[in-house]
Image: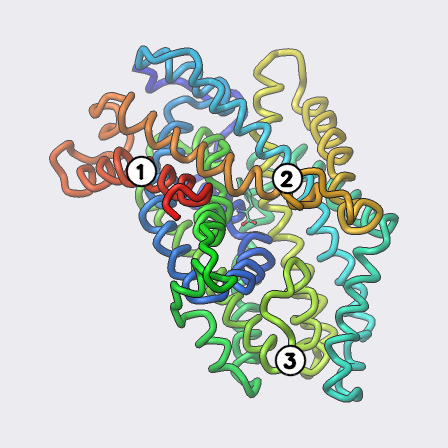
Amino acid sequence: MNIDKVCIHGEWSSRLGFILAATGSAVGLGNIWKFPYMAGEYGGGAFVIIYLVCVALMGLPVMMAEVLLGKRGRCSPINTMRTLAEEVGASKLWQFLGWAGVIAGFLILSYYSVIAGWTLAYIPEVASGTFSAVTTMPETEVMGFVGSIFNNLTGNPLALIFWHTVFIVVTLIMLLGGVQGGLERAVRFMMPALFLLLLVLVGYAMSTPKFMEGVHFMFNVDFHKFFYPKGDQFSGDGLLAAMGQAFFSLSLGMGAIMVYGAYLPKHASIIQTTAVVVVADTLVAILAGLIIFPIVFSNGLEANAGVGLVFKTLPIAFGQMPFGSLVGALFFLLLALAAWSSAISLLEPAIAWLVETGKFTRFSATISSAVAVWLVGFATVFSFNLLADFKPLFDKTLFEQIDYLTSNIMLPLGGLLIAVFVAWMMKRQIITEELELSTDSFGFQLLQFLLRYVTPLGVTLVFLNAIGVFS
Ligand code: TRP
């Protein structure tokens, strides 16, 4: 038994500390930036429903499995998978799951930081009252105006590099602060504040003329349009994207939640804590959609505006509402904070591993990995300007390729392997001991079923569907 195994990196102060940190990891740009624009791109309701199904049937169980692995292994994903594979007598190759995770987190952060930089750039822009101009211009010009401000930003590589750098530097400082001193303290205030502000914005969205149209867009399910976006040509892309988004939004499949699980105090309940995290994350995504789409339709914007959607819609709201400059600046600040609490979880697996090699201190590990991510981020910076037409593969820019590879392939695959490892390789007795369940309880049976069959089959079918096997 490895019950006395301690984690060399420290621990959360309590169960609440873990809940806050894991929610901080889960809630981020994925909920407020990515979820609405993807739902918009894939036609709304069908995407939302499939997303929710994936969260319930794959996200929740995989999160429990991932926390369980971390809590038992007590190390970075690479060493956790190595020691646990040894413990159950499985192949050494399982540690590659840890490696893939470290790499995926690294790649995700490289672009995440650039997008978070947009959020930072919007703080002074909104605060200075730029967007109050929308109240005096003819309605037909609003769209062009908000679009040009967004395009001016993304078209300017130096500005993007500047904000990307600011974001990485602050991420680095938080990571240096370590588990309790840096992260836990920040998240404690941020999450409630962000939630409150979202509710205020939902209130605003309800006051726009097309609120119901927005709601309808989000919840009206049309599977035909979803699978046949271009008339009679079948496409499995939306399904793959919805599943990928479920893993992305919950921070699953690459070891972030695993390493957070490693910092979990010994007696904290895995089941209750993960349930809270999943519900909070889902709620924030839905609220974001309820805010964005009414504004989209009330101002004649297109729901499929892509990555700029949030940056073109919310400023209109801030331009029109009383104290909008203040509320808006506060909103983008909180969004940046939410992005920071996610960013740290993307780099923590790499840092933990570097420290475990014995060749790095926490300080040198953090600095070197942050510098490396910063450099890789340039690929994303240039994807929006100098290299916007450079589409070496599948007609996608470098940013789109990194995003596609990580969200749609690496994370679901990681989730599948985590499910398989826990449900097929580990002894029942270990699982039930960690989960504090009895082997014949309904909860355990259900979880075992979801992890054994539903997740692996689900991921496989969605993959096959996306490459056109069923069409
Ligand atoms: N879940 C975060 C978001 O929604 C992003 C994120 C943080 C993430 N850590 C992760 C995504 C690990 C995948 C894996 O913004």
Disc 1/disc 2 C-alpha distance (Å): 25 Å
Measuring from the top left, give residue 68's x and y in whole percent: 36, 31
> Which residue does the numbered mark 3 point to in the structure image?
300
Residue in front for this viewpoint, 97 or 251: 97
User: Quick one: label 3, few (<14), some, or many (20+) residues within 10 Å?
Assistant: few
Tell me whether circle 1 and circle 3 mark residues in contact (CB < 8 Å): no
Q: Is residue 7 left or right of residue 379?
A: left
Which of the 4 image quarters holds residue 93?
top left
Measuring from the top left, give residue 198's x and y in whole percent: 55, 68
Residue 102 visible in image: yes
- The amino acid type, in three-letter code, at marker 3 is Gly
User: Quick one: label 2, few (<14), some, or many (20+) residues within 10 Å?
Assistant: some
The circle drawn on residue 402 is 2
Which of the 4 image quarters holds residue 141?
bottom right
Name the quarter showing ligand 1. top right
Q: Which color scheme does this rendered protein use? A: rainbow
Question: Vertical placement of 91 versus 211: above or below?
Answer: above
Q: Earlier in the sequence, mark 1 or mark 2?
A: 2
Disc 2/disc 3 C-alpha distance (Å): 31 Å
Mark 2 falls on what kind of element? Answer: helix
Check the image and name the residue furthest to the left: 440
* Viewport quadrant of the N terminus: top left
Question: Vertical placement of 309 versus 26: above or below?
Answer: below
Q: Residue at x 51, y 42 (%)?
A: 408
Q: Residue at x 65, y 35 (%)?
A: 175
Q: Is mark 3 within 8 Å of ligand 1?
A: no
- The amino acid type, in three-letter code, at marker 1 is Leu
- The amino acid type, in three-letter code, at marker 2 is Ile
Measuring from the top left, give residue 172's x and y in whole percent: 71, 36
> Which residue does the numbered mark 1 point to in the structure image?
457
Mark 3 falls on what kind of element? Answer: loop
Which of the 4 image quarters holds residue 258?
top left
